[in-house]
């Protein structure tokens, strides 16, 4: 059954890359690029060059490049690395679909959206998604060579088949802000290889456990503070008896856990200093918090 699913997804992938969009009459040619202009900004629509290591210009003919258009680099077999200018805010559909030698991409720090099938069926193995990306469309990284991915906290949704058939994928960090993960987002990824990392009791944990992926809890930076308490990803740090208050009763409990860390049922609550380890430093820090000597770090 698994082979049938993989085959079906790959057939869809190939079909989506077959049809090419002809250059429109409004396209302008400048060197190796074609582009259009909307509201004084340029969208790159095509590339005829042969560079292996490509740096996309921030301006063309005096127009600021703000978007890489649909299928602009579709099936390019030469490009190995791409550096985007920080002026780019959007990547269109199938922009690098089928780029058979693409390995590494450095994205714009101001990127907001990544279009459907943007890197699908490329050999992309290295990419850093910047903070500020709010939307990644379906199939964006389907059947690529990615090994790890850190999703930005600005993202709230992981769409259909975004990382499907990424069979080298070993690590995905999903922020607490992600509240929806499509059922097939990681279809045909290797369950024995992939570890999904996120906050305890998050959408990421529920998804990982339902799909049979390994889940690991790590400290997050999504903190809120009120009445001397610190909440991280919806969890009240230090509230070991889960009564909604951090006090000396919790301190008594953590002392026992320090003596025997294996007895701790929830590291995400007991790890009050958020360093990923349950040790004497957590006991001391909790005591200082309760006594008012220390405050939670912002």
Image: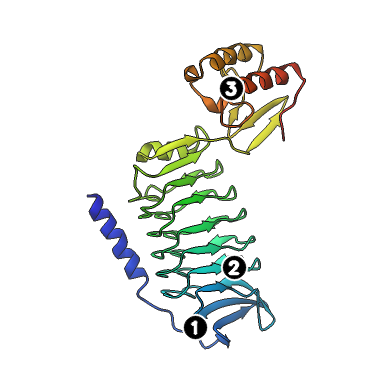
Dot 1: few (<14), some (14–19), or many (≥20) neighbours within 10 Å? Answer: few
Q: Secondary structure at mark 1?
A: loop
Helix, strand or loop at label 3? It is loop
Residue 208's mark? none
Q: Is residue 104 above or below residue 49?
A: above
Circle 2 Cα neighbour tier, 10 Å, few/some/many (<14 / 14–19 / ≥20) = many
Question: Closer to the N terminus: mark 2 or mark 3?
Answer: 2
Which residue, given by chain and number where applicable, does mark 3 sit on?
A: 279
Label 2 vs label 3, nearer the camera = 3
- Is 189 situated left or right of 127 in this image? left
Q: How far from the left and from the top, in percent, is residue 284? A: 67, 19
Viewer-closest of 132 and 130: 130
Q: Are marks 2 and 3 in contact (CB under 8 Å)?
A: no
Which residue: 44% across, 74% down?
74
Category of crowding for the residue at label 3, using alpha-carbon neighbours closer than 10 angstroms: few (below 14), some (14–19), many (at least 20): some
Q: CA distance from mark 3 to mark 1?
A: 58 Å
Report the residue marked by disc 1: 48
Q: Position of residue 234 (x, y in %)?
A: 58, 32
Q: Residue at x 29, y 64 (%)?
A: 11
- Residue on which the image places disc 2: 84
Q: Is residue 68 above or below residue 172?
A: below
Q: Looking at the picture, how far across and down is residue 174, in whole percent?
A: 51, 44
How far apart are labels 1 and 2 at the CA level? 17 Å
In this image, 294 relative to 191: left or right? right
What is the image's colouring? rainbow
Mark whose residue sits in front, 3 or 1: 3
Q: Are marks 3 and 1 in contact (CB under 8 Å)?
A: no
For image coordinates 57% across by 66% down, the residue present is 90
Query: In the rendered structure, which disc, 1 or 2, sits on the residue that comes first in sequence?
Result: 1
Q: At numbered mark 2, what does the secondary structure look like: helix, strand or loop? A: loop
Query: Residue 176 in the image: x percent, y percent?
Result: 55, 40
Q: CA distance from mark 2 to mark 3?
A: 44 Å
């Amino acid at each position: 059954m698994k082979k049938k699913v993989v085959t079906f997804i790959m057939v869809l992938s190939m079909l989506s890359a077959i049809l090419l969009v002809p250059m429109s009459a409004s396209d302008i040619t400048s060197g190796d690029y074609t582009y259009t202009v909307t509201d004084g900004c340029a969208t790159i629509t095509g590339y005829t060059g042969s560079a292996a290591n490509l740096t996309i210009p921030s301006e063309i003919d005096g127009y600021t490049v703000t978007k890489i258009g649909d299928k602009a680099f579709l099936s390019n077999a030469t490009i190995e690395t791409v550096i985007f200018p920080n002026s780019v805010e959007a990547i269109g559909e199938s922009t690098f679909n089928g780029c058979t030698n693409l390995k590494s991409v450095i994205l714009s720090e101001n990127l907001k959206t990544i279009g459907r099938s943007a890197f699908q069926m490329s050999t992309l193995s290295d990419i850093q998604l910047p903070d500020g990306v709010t939307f990644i469309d379906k199939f964006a990284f389907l059947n690529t060579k990615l090994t790890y991915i850190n999703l930005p906290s600005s993202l709230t949704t992981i769409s259909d088949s975004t990382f499907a058939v990424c069979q080298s994928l070993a690590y995905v960090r999903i922020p607490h802000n992600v509240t929806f993960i499509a059922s097939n987002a990681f279809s045909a990824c290797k369950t024995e290889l992939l570890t999904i990392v996120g906050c305890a009791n998050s959408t990421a944990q529920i998804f990982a456990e339902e799909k049979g992926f390994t889940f690991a809890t790590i400290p997050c930076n999504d903190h809120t503070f009120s009445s001397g308490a610190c909440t991280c990803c919806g969890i009240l740090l230090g509230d070991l008896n889960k009564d909604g208050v951090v006090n000396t009763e919790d301190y008594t409990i953590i002392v026992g856990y320090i003596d025997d860390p294996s007895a701790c049922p929830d590291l995400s609550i007991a790890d009050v200093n958020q360093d990923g380890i349950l040790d004497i430093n957590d006991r001391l820090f909790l005591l200082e918090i309760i006594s008012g000597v220390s405050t939670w770090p912002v």
